[in-house]
Amino acid sequence: HDLAGFVAGLPKAELHLHIEGSLEPELMFALAKRNRVAIPFDSVEAVRAAYSFSNLQDFLDIYYQGADVLRVEEDFRDLATAYFDRAAADAVRHAEIFFDPQTHTDRGISFDVVVTGLLAGMAEAEAKHGLTSKLILCFLRHLDEEAAFATLKAAEPWLDRIAAVGLDSSEVGHPPSKFERVFARAGEMGLLRVAHAGEEGPPAYVHEALDLLHIDRLDHGNRALEDPALVTRLARSGMTFTVCPLSNLKLCVIDDIDAHPIERMLRLGLRATVNSDDPAYFGGYVNDNYRALIPAGKLDAGDFATLARNSFLGSFLDDATVSRHL
Ligand code: ES4
Ligand code: ZN
C-alpha cells in the first residue's frame, strides 16, 4: 500500500551486491548458448528450483557453477547492464558492486576481460540512467593468501577504477586474520577496505575485521549484536553495516523475516543499510529487500528514510556528492 510505494520511490544507494549474484537464470541460459557452454539444468524453472539453500556453502557451490557461463568481455558487460537496469527501476542512484576475479581467473578468464566488461556496463548505466557506480574487488577467503596477493597484483593497472577491496566466500574457518597482510598492502595502494564478517562467523571475526583489516565498512555484521561491547564500538565509530534481509532468510541466518534484527540495529544506533547481496539467487532486488521489512510493523516511514539516507552516508562517494543525494 502507501508505505510500500514510499519506500520503493526513495532514492537509494546499493552497497552490497555481488555482480555474479545478479546472473538471472534467463541470462545464464542465453550466455550458455552464445558461448556453447553446457549447464547442468534443462530449463530456467529447473535452475530456480535448485535455489533452495540451508547455509552459505550450499549457495556458494551453485553460485560458482552458474558463473561458468561468463566467458568474454560482453558477457560481463551484459551481466552488469542487466543489474543496473533493474536497480534503476528500484530508484538506485549509486551502486558499489563486488566482483570476484578469482572465480574467473581460475577458469582461464583474464582479470582484464572481467574488469573491461564490467566498466563498459557501468559507463552505459551512467549514460542511460544517471546511475553512478564503483567497483569493489573481493578476495575469495577459502583460497590462500598467495592467491589473494596475485589478484591484487593483477589489479595494479586498474587502481584508478577500483574503489576498494573486500572479502567474501566461505566465512567460517577463514577468519579475517588470514588476509591481514593482503589488506595492509591494499591500504598502502590507496584502496578502501570492506569485509564480510559476522554473517555466519562469530563476533570475534568482526573484531578481527576492525583491528587487523582496518575495514571502512562492514558487510552483514549480524552476529556483532551478540557482543554488547562490540556494538558500542561500532555505534560510536559510525560504522556502516551492509545488511541483506532476503539473503539472511534464504541462507538461514534468520528463521523468519519478521525476526530480522535490522530494527534492533537502528535502535542501537548502528548505521544499517538495506541491500540485495545476490538478487538472482535470493529472490529479490533492493526494493524487494526493503519491502520484506514492512510486514513486521517495526519500521515506520522515518526509519525507511533513515535506511536509504544511511546508504548514501555509508557509500564511498565524496562528501559533496553525498550531500547532493540527501
Ligand atoms: C556471498 Cl551472501 C555471501 N556471503 C559470502 N560470500 C558471498 N559471495 C557471494 N555472496
Ligand atoms: Zn555478500
Image: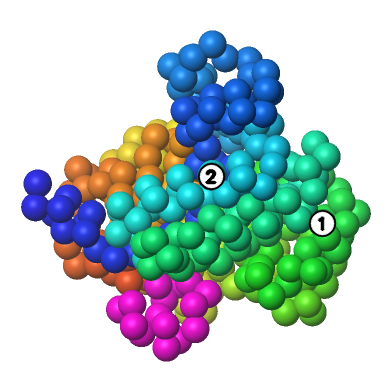
Q: On the image, numbered disc 2 is attached to which residue?
A: 78
- Report whether the residue tagged 1 is closer than 8 Å to ligand 1: no
Q: Around disc 1, counting alpha carbons within 10 Å, would you say few (fewer than 14), some (14 to 19), or many (20 or more)? A: many
Magenta range is 312-326
How many numbered marks, from 0 up?
Answer: 2
| Amino acid at the residue labelled 1 | Thr
Vertical placement of residue 313 versus 10, above or below: below
The residue under the point 19% across, 67% down is 302
Vertical placement of residue 184 versus 249, above or below: below
The residue under the point 31% across, 44% down is 288
- The image shows residue 83 at horizontal and vertical percentages of 46, 48
- The image shows residue 26 at horizontal and vertical percentages of 47, 28
Q: How far is disc 1 from disc 2 in space, using C-alphas?
A: 23 Å
| Amino acid at the residue labelled 2 | Asp
Q: Nearer the viewer, mark 1 or mark 2?
A: 2
Q: On the image, numbered disc 1 is attached to which residue?
A: 151
Under circle 2, the secondary element is helix
* Residue 151 vs residue 258, the one in the foreground: 151
- Comes first in the chain, label 1 or label 2: 2
